[in-house]
Amino acid sequence: MAAAMQRRKLLILETDRALRRELEAVFSDLDVTVCETSEQTLATVRRTEPDVVLFDLGTAHKPAVAAQSLELLRQILNISPDTKIIAMTEHDARELAVAAVGLGAADFYHKPLDAGVLSIVVRRALRIRELEEENWRLRERTGAMALEGIIGVSDAIRSLCRAVEKVAPTNTTVLLLGESGTGKELLARALHRLSGRSHKPFVAINCAAIPDTLLESELFGYEKGAFTGAARRTAGKLESGDGGTVFLDEIGEMPASLQAKLLRVVQERTVERIGGRTPLSLDLRIVCATNRDLTSLIGNGGGSFREDLFYRISEVIIRVPPLRDRQGDSLLLAQSLLQQLSARLGKPTRGLAPDAIRAIQAHRWPGNVRELENRIKGAVIMAEGAVVTAGDLGLEDPGDDPEYLNLRVARQRAEAQAVRQSLAVAQGNLSRAAELLGVTRPTLYDLLGKHRIDAAQFGRHAAGAADGGAMKADASPAAGGATSLVTDAE
Ligand SMILES: Nc1ncnc2c1ncn2[C@@H]1O[C@H](COP(=O)(O)OP(=O)(O)OP(=O)(O)O)[C@@H](O)[C@H]1O
Ligand SMILES: [Mg+2]
């Protein structure tokens, strides 16, 4: 509600002074900023992220000016993608208006100015902006959560869950890639649960757990008398998954002889029982998983995995990030598993001691969630005291500074990091850095003093060695992890 009470922000970019005045008067109920130049406009957009920009693109008669206008429009949307831009043009510049809409403008308006009509256009754009915000708030509350049974708050796990939601209803063959214990099977089950096949079977086959000699009959089944001991016709696992989802776990371990047979299943959706003569058609969704780097097993890299099969099973690849790359998840998982396991094991719920919390956050979790689960289980069984300590988990207390949970400290660190990053990008130019940060120069001076940052260090020639590292650290972890989750292997 508070957002709705706030006056909406309108930026007017118009070179004609008389028209600027007139527009200001028409929209006097809004929080209006008028700009004349592109520099002013970009600085204002950075600082205020206006709801709507009323942008006079000029006429089509001056192609150079028109090109500049379109470039500015692109930059505005780059900085503030949610801003609605209304492209105003001269009466004769239809194509320019169309080009603007093509670049992402929300609407256009041809001069001459008709205050009533223009007001409707602007208010319609504001309404769209409000609806988008409302939608976003609702999604934040509901949609941005992890999936049922999947615990996590990190950006990485959220994007992962969104990816699962997107592909689940399709029949696409999905390959889940991730280290051991990251939750691949859990996600495969979620893919099934969220699909139209949820009322049909989910059949999991661990290709590594079944001896090569048995895997074939396990997968494909056999006819009576197909081999010694085949006393009666037996359906294979693929057949029993008809209508549902078949999960082929540890697909990288599948013997070469079976890969060719599996390729046929994937391509034609038919199976032939051992000793059988007629292929059976099946309706299957296939999901595969592996913790191995399949591409290195293909061809020259050793040749133990068929390239054609790889492409068939990897229509969509979902990468499941290791626990250490999911910020905040290890502690949340630990707390939730502690509750679950102590209830299940009939031991009263204990909390985590401060040294356990520190240890959980510092540990690298090479065995991922499975390792966490095992350590918590062990601790619940073994712990003597009222709370679980780092020692109960078999972890060492890293003795980190106790401020890590303090929001004020976290904010300050983020602030200092942003200032350093802007200075690095601006190569020490204070006006530019202030502009990037969306603050005034005096504010930037205050920030430099507060965080004891020496801007001169970031100057054109001094930059590099010292701060290149800091920049990399800022840019990589969260963003990189989150965006590389899903790749559509076309
Ligand atoms: N995000 C999560 N929330 C809750 N439990 C999880 C999560 N991720 C994994 N688990 C639990 O951790 C354990 C390991 O998960 P899962 O078996 O799905 O991993 P995996 O990637 O298949 O591992 P492996 O390679 O060892 O087979 C399971 O008990 C699973 O329920
Ligand atoms: Mg598994």
Image: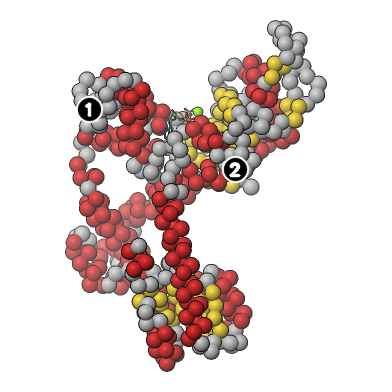
- Residue furthest bottom as drawn: 18
Q: Residue at x 54, y 81 (%)?
A: 109
Asked whether residue 449 is in view, the answer is yes
Q: Residue at x 55, y 77 (%)?
A: 108
As displayed, is residue 463 above or below residue 209? Answer: below
- Report whether the residue tagged 1 is closer than 8 Å to ligand 1: no
As displayed, is residue 358 above or below residue 9? Answer: above
Q: Which residue is mark 2?
A: 169
Q: Between disc 1 and disc 2, whose residue precedes?
A: 2
Q: Residue at x 53, y 89 (%)?
A: 112
Q: Quadrant of residue 199?
A: top right
The residues tagged by marks 1 and 2 sit, at their Cα atoms, a distance apart of 43 Å
Residue nearest the observer in this picture, 235 or 181: 235
Q: Quadrant of residue 313?
A: top right
Residue 220's label in the rendered image is: none
Q: Quadrant of residue 299?
A: top right
Mark 2 Cα shell of 10 Å, populated few (<14), some (14-19), many (≥20):
some
- Rendering coords of residue 267 (x, y %): 72, 35
Q: Secondary structure at mark 2?
A: loop
- Residue furthest right as drawn: 277
- Left or right of 389, for residue 184: right
Q: Which residue is mark 1?
A: 387
Q: Residue at x 40, y 76 (%)?
A: 10
- Rendering coords of residue 20 (x, y %): 42, 87
Q: Quadrant of the N terminus?
A: bottom left
Asked whether residue 60 is in view, the answer is no
Residue nearest the observer in this picture, 47 or 366: 47
